[in-house]
Image (tube, rainbow, N blue to C red):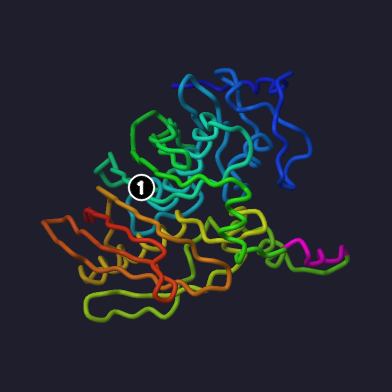
Amino acid sequence: MLQAIAPASMSSSVSAVKSVTPWMDRPLMPLSEAAPYTVLSAQELYPRICVRDPYFALKDVTVLPGEVVARVPVQMDPDAQAMPIGLGEAGRHLAILGSCASALVAPKDGQHFYLASAARGQWLAPQAQERTTDLLWALAQAEYTGKRTCTARTLLSASDGTPLFRLEVDYNVLSAAAFTRLFGQAKLEMRAAPRPADNVQRTPEEWAKLRQNPYSKPLELTDWKHEDGTLRSSLVVTPELCKGHFAMHPVMPVAVVAGGMTRMATTLGRSLEQSDTARFVAKDVKLSADSLAYSGQTVVFGAQRTKVRGADHTFACFASVGERVVAQLDVTFTRVD
């Protein structure tokens, strides 16, 4: 088990590429120059992976020989998943760490957008567990599979090192210029809105809402319908739901979409099992993400149970905007209580 590591200096005399984001005001050394056991600061990572807090919540992202390791907080209640962390949130943290690992081996240093296009995972702890209050461990290795594609192999473990979740994530890697060309229609100048005046009076609840992390609570899905074996619901994407993903281009993170789909699966499972308190443990998951949902668009989530074998329930889930498929998820859950 890796022990606590003091941050190492990131100073270097090597040439560096200056980021075009507003998150950084000085050149940084190429991440490939980072020595083992270097702790990478948020300021080192944000400009390169193009996501930031609150979507980015990893702690102590540390370079090891051939991989990166980090501590992982659990921010959301797993609800119907009898697991220390829900699948969607686990995927969120691991995909971000995978992009950090990818930045370490990028052929060119600088700013890149890592868009998750597919993922394959296995939950490794079949027993029922409660939500953990400890920081989990995660590690990731990455390699480029093409000029603009890479794959990260990640592992999430409990605080004592027990393996929990293995996830392999494929990314499409875009330069800032390519991202702007492809997703320019999603641009939203959120900084143009004036900040609230200092003398505005607010209740403690109103201040708490302003500080709220959208990734700490489930999506507020509406229009639930169960027809012909398929459970559906919908959600209007707002900039608030996309905080930190991406700068001035608020789009719903694939991991959050995946979290919505797994919730559809467990909700449908409870309905078919005729138990509002039934809980499930994940087994296998396979995700494909074909596009992104922009702020202002309505996403329809759906799930259908495709197979039942004993306590195992397999679901085919989808998320779409109109006729456009955003993502699809095949997941198997085992009912444990």
Q: Residue lying farthest left?
A: 310
**Residue 334 shown left or right of residue 239 in the figure:** left
Q: Is residue 318 visible?
A: yes
| 191 part of magenta stretch | yes
Q: Main secondary structure of the magenta part?
A: loop
| Residue that badge 1 annotates | 119
Question: 199 or 14, which is in the foreground?
Answer: 14
Q: Residue at x 38, y 67 (%)?
A: 325
Question: 59 or 246, which is in the foreground?
Answer: 246
Question: 207 or 44, which is in the foreground?
Answer: 44
Q: Residue at x 65, y 33 (%)?
A: 41
**Label 1's element?**
strand
Query: x, y percentage for residue 237?
Result: 54, 69
Q: Classify 10 Å Cα crowding around label 1: few (below 14), some (14-19), many (20 and above).
A: many
Question: 1 or 297, which is in the foreground?
Answer: 297
Q: Quadrant of the N terminus?
A: top left
**Residue 55 shown left or right of residue 140 in the figure:** right
Q: Residue at x 57, y 36 (%)?
A: 59
Query: x, y percentage for residue 132?
Result: 43, 43
Total labels drawn: 1
Magenta residues span 190-198
